[in-house]
Amino acid sequence: MYEDPQVPRMSGAFRASPPAGASFLVAMIARELASAASEDQSHGFYVAVGHRIAAVVPLDDVEDLGTMTARINALWAALGWGSAVVTVEDSAIVVRHDGLYPDTEAEIATPWKQLLPPLMEGTYETWFRMMGSSRALGTSARWIDRTLEIRHGR
């Protein structure tokens, strides 16, 4: 059976519409975690969740950034989490991800903006490792306006 290399192999659960209130629920869980855990513990938790997200769409058979970009954007589209552009710069592979958090009131958007950098750090780090990246390279994420920039490199 032919599989399109640009179509991610992922569970049908990701093709379903999220239940009403899912963004609100995630925001409230993030607020509770922030009140009960240290900043380092919260960061580690979201990085670990990112590793799990990456495992849903394996990239171990991907050899180029075009196929990687197509696969990850298929996942983000299925989740309603915007889209990413991947570029190669001097010392890093840079992902610029737009449309990630709900365009809604601060009560919901603020927790999303806080949890997404470590979540995407874990997700993209795992994907780059699947594709053979060296452990000597690191992954970081930061907001630039409404775009999350993820850097993998030195």
Image: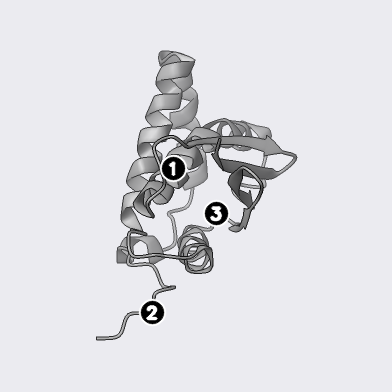
For the residue carrying disc 1, how many other residues have a C-alpha within 10 Å: few (<14), some (14-19), or many (20+)?
A: many
Single out the residue that lies furthest toward the right.
145
Which mark, residue 4?
Answer: 2
Q: How far apart are marks 3 and 2 (CA)?
A: 22 Å
Residue 101: tell me if it is visible: no
Q: Which residue type carries mark 2?
A: Asp
The residue beneath circle 1 is 125
Find numbered disc 2 in the image and state the secondary structure of the residue it sits on.
Answer: loop
Q: Position of residue 8 (x, y in %)?
A: 38, 67
- Quadrant assignment for the C terminus: top right
Find numbered disc 3 in the image and state the secondary structure of the residue it sits on.
Answer: loop
Q: Where is residue 18 in the image (x, y as percent from the top left)?
A: 44, 56
Q: Which residue type carries mark 1?
A: Glu
Q: Earlier along the polypeptide chain: callout 1 or callout 2?
A: 2
For the residue carrying disc 3, how many other residues have a C-alpha within 10 Å: few (<14), some (14-19), or many (20+)?
A: some
The residue beneath circle 3 is 81
Residue 81: tell me if it is visible: yes
**122 w.r.t. 128: above or below:** above
Q: Earlier along the polypeptide chain: callout 3 or callout 2?
A: 2
Image quadrant where residue 146 sits: top right
Q: Earlier along the polypeptide chain: callout 3 or callout 1?
A: 3
For the residue carrying disc 2, how many other residues have a C-alpha within 10 Å: few (<14), some (14-19), or many (20+)?
A: few
Image quadrant where residue 110 sits: top right
Single out the residue that lies furthest toward the left.
1
| Residue at position x 49%, y 38% in the image | 121
Mark closer to the observer (3, 2): 2
Mark closer to the observer (3, 1): 1
